[in-house]
Image: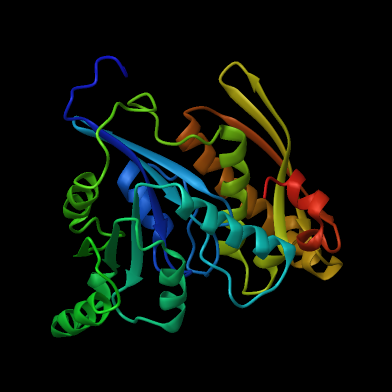
Amino acid sequence: MAEDAPAAFRCGHVAIVGRPSVGKSTLLNAFVGARVSITSKKPQTTRHRIVGILTTPDAQFIFVDTPGFQTKHRSRLNERLNRAVRDALADVDVVVFVVDATRFTEQDRQVLDLVPKTTPTIVALNKIDAVTDKSTLLPRIAEIAALRDFAAIVPISAERGTDLNALLDAIRERLPAGPALYPEDDVTDRDERFLAAEFIREKIFRQLGDEVPYGTAVAIDSFEHEGDLRRIHATVYVDRASQRMILIGEGGSRMKAIATQARHDMESLFGGKVFLEVWVRVKRGWADSDAMLTRLGY
């Protein structure tokens, strides 16, 4: 494919950055047309650097979805997440700075301060569908434009797909000329094992309250193919015994619901039947254990 790429073809890495809950993962999934990055209404859901790939007739966009920069909680886990944001910004061709159109905060400014001024940066003013008074958009755009010489500011709605083509056009103009780096039908560089763990973690975030999801981590103990069947055994680690009880639920009902929903998502993405077994174990201090974080892939 690389040898056949036309001279006008462009290819490059694009970091998607922003404070938690501005819609970075939703934007990535909308771009690639598949759920390669988990989402929930809770902040700081994304913990890994996720690569999503979109190939069009004239360009290949290699999107890097980053964790929301962590400013509230101090742990070795969050130190690693913040390092992932910095690393992503150090080696990309374009940055998409995602901002919530309904409010611009000091935390947005802190994230912007991390973005090198030498890298072309495009503002994706997201969630414009949530702005009831559209006359407030122009002052918001002016407020953001005054912060830096941005390459472009594009109002969008990632959830509804509004004006994503305009955003893609703005990105493509700033990608370097060159051949594609991935096959044209790839949508991510992550394997099924990783995606299985993420689907389980997403359901935990969606099913439980504000505290427990942040104290959990998911490890895939085994992932085996038996024809079209995938047989997956996973462990959810929690920090305290009380969290384990909440996660399991009465008679195991909550964990069963989480596993069932995760299995359905896996079967949809993987295109085959999945047998999923999930255990819950207490591992005190896992978020501050370098050995445990390395094992979990952080």
User: Percent position (x, y) of residue 134?
Assistant: 15, 80
Q: Quadrant of residue 255?
A: bottom right
Camera-nearest residue between 180 and 240: 180
Q: Is residue 125 left or right of residue 297?
A: left
| Quadrant of the drawing holding the N terminus | top left
| Residue at horizontal 22 percent and vertical 49 percent from the top | 168
Q: Quadrant of residue 105?
A: bottom left
Task: Say if 254 sits above or below 147 in the image.
Answer: above
Camera-nearest residue between 201 and 194: 194
User: Percent position (x, y) of residue 124?
Assistant: 28, 63
User: Percent position (x, y) of residue 280?
Assistant: 79, 53
Can residue 133 be seen here? no
Q: Is residue 232 left or right of residue 42?
A: right
Q: Is residue 154 left or right of residue 255?
A: left
Q: Residue furthest front?
A: 118
Q: Is residue 79 left or right of residue 64?
A: right
| Residue at horizontal 76 percent and vertical 64 percent from the top | 250
Q: Quadrant of residue 244?
A: bottom right
Task: Say if 115 sits above or below 185 in the image.
Answer: below
User: Percent position (x, y) of residue 8?
Assistant: 16, 30
Task: Say if 189 sits above or below 94 in the image.
Answer: above
Can residue 195 be seen here? yes
